[in-house]
Image (cartoon, rainbow, N blue to C red):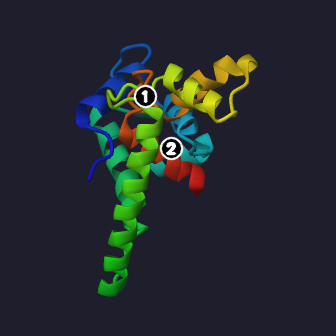
Amino acid sequence: MSLIQTNDLQRIFEKLDKNGDGLVSLEELNWLLGKIGVQISLDELESLVGKSSLDLNEFFSFYGSISSKQSNTSRSTSNEVVVVEEEEEENEESDLVKAFEVFDLNGDGFISCDELQKVLSRLGLWDENSGKDCRVMIHVYDTNLDGLLDFEEFKNMMFLSIS
């Protein structure tokens, strides 16, 4: 299962390719990884990638390799354990849907900065002086760069926050 659709990955690539040469530098890639909470040095990234920049197809391959590594680390060989894990994942998914719906006040399938601020205010977790924090909180996990959190981005945020 791919967490990010191909057209979204292409838009991310195009946003990262600031000079329009069809390549994303390791610095740009490292900036993106940092934004989603992956801390890696440029040397480590170059060793991992094997070159100083990626074209669109290489960017897709890179994303595919890091996505498959994440999903493979959670698999088990025991059938009983897999069944229990699937039930736990379904329960977690259901809980995440409910949590997402708490923040998605207008029911459009996205969490905006305004919605996040309203819910945090209701919970007593919002300080009027921290208006920038709301935009930053969304931006860190907004993988398709639309300024909103959809459910998959929310789910990734929650799993990254828990681990």
Q: Nearer the viewer, residue 127 or 132?
A: 127
Q: Is 143 on the left or on the right of 90, as rendered? A: right
Q: Which residue corresponds to mark 2? A: 157
Q: Is 136 on the left or on the right of 93, as rendered? A: right
**Which mark is nearer the camera, 1 or 2?**
1
Q: Nearer the viewer, residue 25 or 118?
A: 118
Q: Give me the residue at 65% from left, 25% from top.
A: 133
Q: Is residue 118 above or below residue 162?
A: above
Q: Nearer the viewer, residue 141 or 34?
A: 141
The picture places residue 95, in percent across and down from the top left corner, at 43, 54
Residue type of the residue flagged with mark 1: Leu
The picture places residue 148, in percent across and down from the top left corner, at 43, 25
Q: Is residue 15 above or below residue 41?
A: above
Residue type of the residue flagged with mark 2: Met
For mark 1, does the 10 Å Cα neighbourhood hold few (<14), some (14 to 19), or many (20 or more) residues?
some
Q: How many marks?
A: 2
Q: Which residue corresponds to mark 1? A: 105
Q: Give me the residue at 33% from left, 32% from top.
A: 109
Q: Give me the residue at 68% from left, 28% from top.
A: 126
Query: How far apart are the two marked residues, 1 and 2, measured between alpha carbons?
Result: 18 Å
SS state under label 2: helix
* Outermost residue, top side: 19
Q: Give me the residue at 46% from left, 38% from top.
A: 102
First in sequence, mark 1 or 2: give its number: 1
| Mark linked to residue 20 | none
Q: Is residue 33 above or below residue 133?
A: below
Where does the C terminus fall, quadrant-wise?
bottom right
Q: Is 60 on the left or on the right of 142, as rendered? A: left
**Residue 30 placement: quadrant:** top right
Residue 50 visible in rendering: no
